[in-house]
Image (cartoon, grey):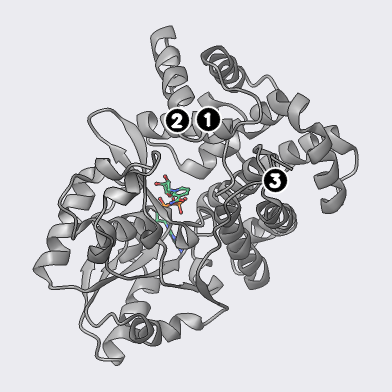
Amino acid sequence: MSKLVSKWNYPTTVRFGAGRIAELPDTLAATGIKRPLFVTDPGLAKLPVVASTLKILDDAKIPYGVFSDVKPNPVESNLVAGIEVFKAGGHDGVIAFGGGSALDLGKLIAFQAGQTRPVWDFEDIGDWWTRANADAIVPIVAVPTTAGTGSEVGRAGVITHEATHTKKVIFHPKMLPAIVIADPELTTGMPAFITAGTGMDALAHCLEAYCAPGYHPMADGIAVEGIRLVFENLPKAYANGNDLVARAHMMSAAAMGATAFQKGLGAIHSLSHPIGALYDTHHGMTNAVFMPYVLAFNRGAIEERIVRLAAYCGIDGGFDGFARAILKLREELNVPHTLPGLIKGLDMDQARKELIADMAVVDPTAGGNPIELTKKVALDLLECAIEGTV
Ligand code: NAD
C-alpha cells in the first residue's frame, strides 16, 4: 500500500465545441476581465481567424489590446515586451490565443506582470512556485488554435532562456486558465506540417505519461483514451484539414495529453527540449522523431503496459505491433525518421552531442522516464535518431 500515495490535479472549465468562440465575451464576464490583452503570434495575427475573433470583441464593445511579438519557441525578450504592453494598456487579464507558443506566452504575461522577482525564480523546481505573489496573477482565458501542446489546460509555461539556450518550465497553479474555449473550427487552417507535429505532441504527452512510473490511474486512463483518439483521428485531420470531427477529437486528445502528463514525461521530451532550444525545431515534430527510439529503449520496463494499451487501441501484435503502428503513423504524416531529416544540413560533432546529452539528463522530464536516462543512454538514443536505427 505504501506506493499507493500520489497527488492528483485536474483541469479547468472547458467550453468545448465548434462555434463556441462566439462565447468569448461571456467568458470574459465570467472571469471578471474588463480590459483584456489578446496575445497571439505574428503568423496567426495575419490570418482571418484572428480578425474574426477580434470582431467578436469589437461587436461586444470590449476594449482590448493586441500583442503578437511571440517567437515559435518564446524567449524572455518576448515576455518582457508583452509585460510592457500589458502594463501600458492598463489590462486586467489575458486572452491567450494560438498554439502552445502564444498560449504559453499569454499565460506567462498574466503570471509575471505583477511579480517583483525574475521569472527564472519560478522554474518548476520543488516548491519554487510558492515564491510568487499569487494575488498579483491576473485571470487567463485560453483559446487553442492547434491541437497538441494542451497548454490551455496546463499550469505551466515554457520559455527559452536565451543566454544558456535552455527551455525552462515556469510553474504556478494560478497559471491554469480560468476558462478554455476549445473550438475545433479554429484549428482547420493549420498547415499539414503543424497538424502532424502538434498531433504527435499530443501522442507523446499521452504515451510518456502512461509509461511514467508512479501511481496515477486517472492519468493512465486519460492517456490511454487520448492515444486511441490520436491513432484514429490524426491521419484524418492530416489528410483533410476541414474534417471537423477529426479536428474535435484531436483537440480533446491534446487537452488529455496535458492533463495526463502531470504524472510525468520522459526521454522523448528530455531529448526534444535541447534540440528545440539549440535548433529551434518544432516541438511536437521533434518529439515525433525521437518517439520510436525511446519506445524501443524503454521496452524492458513498459512491455506489459504497452501490450494492454495496444489491445485497447485495437492494434494487433502486442508491443511489436504497437511499435510498428507508431512507425506507420509517422510515415503517413511524413514525419522525418531521423534528426538529419528534421534539421537540414545537420552536422553534429562529438562536443555538440555531449552537450545535448548533458542537457537531456538534467531536463525536468528526465526523471519520468521508466528507465534511468544516464548520459550514456542519452548519447545512444541521440545516435539512434541520427542514424535511424530503431
Ligand atoms: P506554435 O504555437 O509554435 O505554432 C506553430 C505555427 O503554427 C505558428 O507559425 C502559428 O502561427 C501556426 N498556427 C497556429 N495555429 C494555427 C491555425 N489555426 N492556423 C494556421 N496556422 C496556425 O506550435 P505548438 O506546437 O502549438 O506549440 C509549441 C510550443 O508549445 C513550444 O514553444 C513548446 O515548448 C510549447 N509547449 C508547451 C507545453 C505546456 O505544457 N505549456 C507543452 C508542450 C509544448
- Disc number placed over residue 124 in the picture, else none: none
**Is 22 displayed left or right of 50 in the figure?**
right
- Going by the numbered disc 1, the residue's amino acid type is Ala
Which of pointers 3 and 2 indicates the residue nearer the eye?
3
Q: Earlier in the sequence, mark 1 or mark 3?
A: 3
Q: Residue furthest bottom?
A: 60
Q: Is mark 2 within 8 Å of ligand 1?
A: no
Read off the residue under disc 2.
363
Q: Secondary structure at mark 3?
A: loop
- Going by the numbered disc 2, the residue's amino acid type is Asp
Read off the residue under disc 3.
4
113 shown above or below 357: below
The percent position of residue 27, horizontal first and vertical second, equals 40, 82
180 shown above or below 105: below
Q: Residue furthest top?
A: 350
The foreground one among 177 and 268 is 177
- Residue that appears at 33% across and 41% down: 123
12 shown above or below 335: below
**Is 237 displayed left or right of 1 in the figure?**
left
Read off the residue under disc 1.
366
Q: Secondary structure at mark 2?
A: loop
Instruction: For residue 285, say whether it is visible.
Output: yes
124 shown above or below 343: below
Cα separation, mark 3 vs mark 2, equals 26 Å
The foreground one among 111 and 49 is 111
- Residue that appears at 74% across and 28% down: 301
The percent position of residue 205, horizontal first and vertical second, equals 59, 46
Characterize the local packing of mark 1: few (<14), some (14-19) or many (20 or more) Cα atoms within 10 angstroms.
many
Instruction: For residue 75, say whether it is visible.
Output: no
Name the image quarter holding residue 167: top left
Which of pointers 1 and 3 indicates the residue nearer the eye?
3
